[in-house]
Each structure stands twice: as structure tokens, then as C-alpha cells.
Image: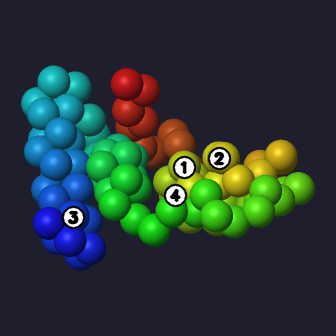
């Protein structure tokens, strides 16, 4: 598989894993799906390892996985009311 098809494959795996999570946990919404997509699609995205390390990175979009290894200090802007969603802690 190449390029876009690997991303499609990652999304399909994420949807399957999320459906299994829903059967086990019965969450009240689908917000955990984004974390499954990030985990399964990230290996197929362009590598960020060639970039330098920054003093500070600010992530404004969920999931915040992409800034974790590229900065000495990290900040994530979480614009979600967590009292209205169910977070997958697995």
C-alpha cells in the first residue's frame, strides 16, 4: 500500500477499534474516536523527525500527539467542555 491508502487503512482500523470500545464502555458520545484515528493514522503520515526541536509548541487541534516529541515545552489549547464528553482513558 502507498500514501493515501495507508491513511485509509489506518482510519478503517481506528473505526473498528472504536466500535469495539463502544461495545465495551457504552460512551455517551463519539469524542474518543479522534484518539483512535490519531493513533492509527500517525504512523503513515510524513515524518516530523527531520525538523528541529523547538522551545515551545502550541497545539490547537485535538489530538495533541503531534507536538509531543518536537518541543522542550508543550501547550495544548483544549477548547472542549469535558463535562459533556466521555474520555477514553485506555
The residue lying at 37 percent from left, 46 percent from top is 39
Give the alpha-carbon distance from disc 2 to disc 4, as whole Å: 12 Å
Residues tagged 2 and 1 counted as in contact (Cβ below 8 A): yes
Give the alpha-carbon distance from disc 2 to disc 1, as whole Å: 6 Å
| Mark 3 closeness class: few <14, some 14–19, many ≥20 residues within 10 Å | some
For numbered disc 4, what is the local secondary structure? Answer: loop
Q: Which mark is residue 57?
A: none
Q: Residue furthest right?
A: 55
Does residue 5 appear to the left or right of 54 in the view shown? left
Q: Position of residue 36 (x, y in %)?
A: 31, 46
In this rendering, the label closer to the viewer, 1 or 4: 1
Which residue in the protein does label 1 denote?
65
| Mark 1 closeness class: few <14, some 14–19, many ≥20 residues within 10 Å | some
In this rendering, the label closer to the viewer, 3 or 1: 3
Residues tagged 1 and 4 counted as in contact (Cβ below 8 A): no
Which residue in the protein does label 4 denote?
62
Which residue in the protein does label 2 denote?
68
Which residue in the protein does label 3 denote?
6
Pick the front one: 27 or 69: 69
The N terminus appears in which quarter of the rendering?
A: bottom left
Amino acid at each position: 500500500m502507498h500514501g493515501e491508502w495507508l491513511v485509509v487503512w489506518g482510519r478503517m482500523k481506528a473505526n473498528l477499534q472504536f466500535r469495539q470500545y463502544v461495545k465495551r464502555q457504552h460512551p455517551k458520545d463519539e469524542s474518543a474516536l479522534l484518539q483512535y484515528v490519531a493513533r492509527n493514522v500517525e504512523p503513515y503520515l510524513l515524518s516530523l523527525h527531520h525538523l528541529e526541536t523547538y522551545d515551545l509548541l502550541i497545539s490547537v487541534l485535538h489530538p495533541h500527539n503531534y507536538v509531543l516529541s518536537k518541543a522542550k515545552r508543550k501547550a495544548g489549547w483544549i477548547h472542549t467542555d469535558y463535562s459533556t464528553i466521555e474520555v477514553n482513558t485506555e
